[in-house]
Image (spheres, rainbow, N blue to C red):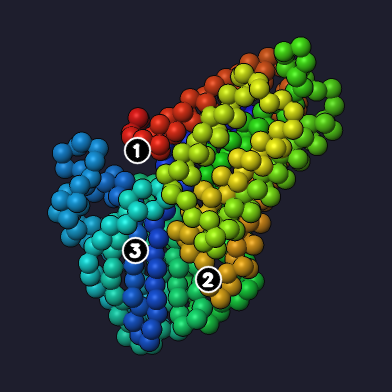
Amino acid sequence: MLLRLLLVLLFYSAGGVALAHKASDSYLTLNVVGNQAQGQWDIALRDLDFAIGLDANDDRAITWQELRSQHAAINSYASSHLQVSAGGADCALTPHQNLVDKHSDGAYSVLQFTLDCPAPITDIDIHYSLFFDIDPQHRGLLRLSHQDTTQTAVFSPAQAQQQLHLSSTTPGTVFGQYLLEGVWHIWQGYDHILFLLSLLLPAVFYRQNSNWHALPQFRPAGLDVAKIVTAFTVAHSLTLSLATLNVIDLPTRWVESAIAASVLLAALNNLVPLVTRRLWLVAFGFGLIHGLGFANVLKDLGLPQNLLLWSLLAFNVGVELGQLAIVGGFLPCAYGLRHTRFYQSIVFTGGSVLIAVLALIWLIERAFNLSVL
């Protein structure tokens, strides 16, 4: 089970190498006024290229000319996967201009449009199916604004159709939405997970005479993991909050490259131990960097300004719950297998090597804007 978990993580991480911070998302923004909604839909170029083909000369670089020639195809493809109705009547979608914007994980096509509904919008039904037929992991992230309130929703194959009431936004609703967002994004942040696992892999060992030895009792391992997770949580919560509030603003490439470097160093430390005590300090130091990565995701999602701190708290709590679920699944298995050659050679050593290789690829791709795989 433990090996399967690690292999699954590595498989999905390798599937989106440089983009491993997050899975496939699109960002749909609707601003409702009367019987109209002004819309903007940000869709990753890499996803559109896979779905309809944008790279005409197959040189692995999408130019503005290639994108412009496909504007009509993009509009047609996207609008065929979005149906909106209000008061039981369909709303007409009128596309406007197509732009390009950069998100934390690459370039996005930006579709601007207007929704015209037969009557003033008090509730809105949305059926979203973009990419679900080719990527079940894709999520559509909706931000719906009306007057001074903002609410969000996440579309998935299991929740492709949702109804939102413009007057139903409450602190409890917002907290629940952003709590789930926090859980989802830590589970999809493969670089964060592999960094955490790199620190957890040696938690069931102690270092003596230049060798790793299995701990005789669970308590030291549990305490060590508690310190690591707490330090990581405090650190990334701090920088996540500061970056989301625009107190800190660093270039995305720097942040994502530093995150990849942290994963690489944590994995290499298992193979060539330089830090064997107080790993919680390592978790805290690198956790400050990882928090900036979480902030990039949260900024892309958007926060309701009327409940800014409430939603930020919920997202942090969600991330922590997601981490605890990972730790709760990993640590008992690791402790139970700590004496076995399987854990010592395959999971610990082999897993650390694989994580280091993957992190090195991330680092090269992110730092130099290259495509290795």
Earlier in the chain: of badge 3 and badge 2, it is 3
> Which corner quadrant holds the N terminus?
top right
The secondary structure type at the circle numbered 2 is: loop
State the mark number for residue 369.
Answer: 1
Q: Amino acid at mark 2?
A: Pro
Is residue 339 shown above or below 236? Answer: above
State the mark number for residue 105.
Answer: none
Residue 101 in the figure: left or right of residue 253:
left
The secondary structure type at the circle numbered 1 is: loop
The residues tagged by marks 3 and 2 sit, at their Cα atoms, a distance apart of 18 Å
Residue 368 in the figure: left or right of residue 318:
left
State the mark number for residue 41.
Answer: 3
Q: Position of residue 312 (x, y in %)?
A: 60, 63
> Which corner quadrant holds the C terminus?
top left
Is residue 327 shown above or below 234? Answer: above
Residue depicted at x 53% and y 50%:
292
Q: Position of residue 314 (x, y in %)?
A: 63, 62
Residue depicted at x 57% and y 29%:
265
In this figure, which residue is indicated by the disc labeled 2? 304
- Dot 2 alpha-carbon crowd within 10 angstroms: few under 14, some 14 to 19, many 20 or more: some
Q: Position of residue 290 (x, y in %)?
A: 56, 45
Disc 1 to disc 3: CB gap under 8 Å? no
Name the quadrant containing residue 307: bottom right
The secondary structure type at the circle numbered 3 is: strand
- Dot 1 alpha-carbon crowd within 10 angstroms: few under 14, some 14 to 19, many 20 or more: few
Residue depicted at x 60% and y 30%:
266
Of marks 2 and 1, the one in the foreground: 1
Q: Amino acid at mark 3?
A: Trp
Name the quadrant containing residue 62: top left
Q: Is residue 326 visible?
A: no
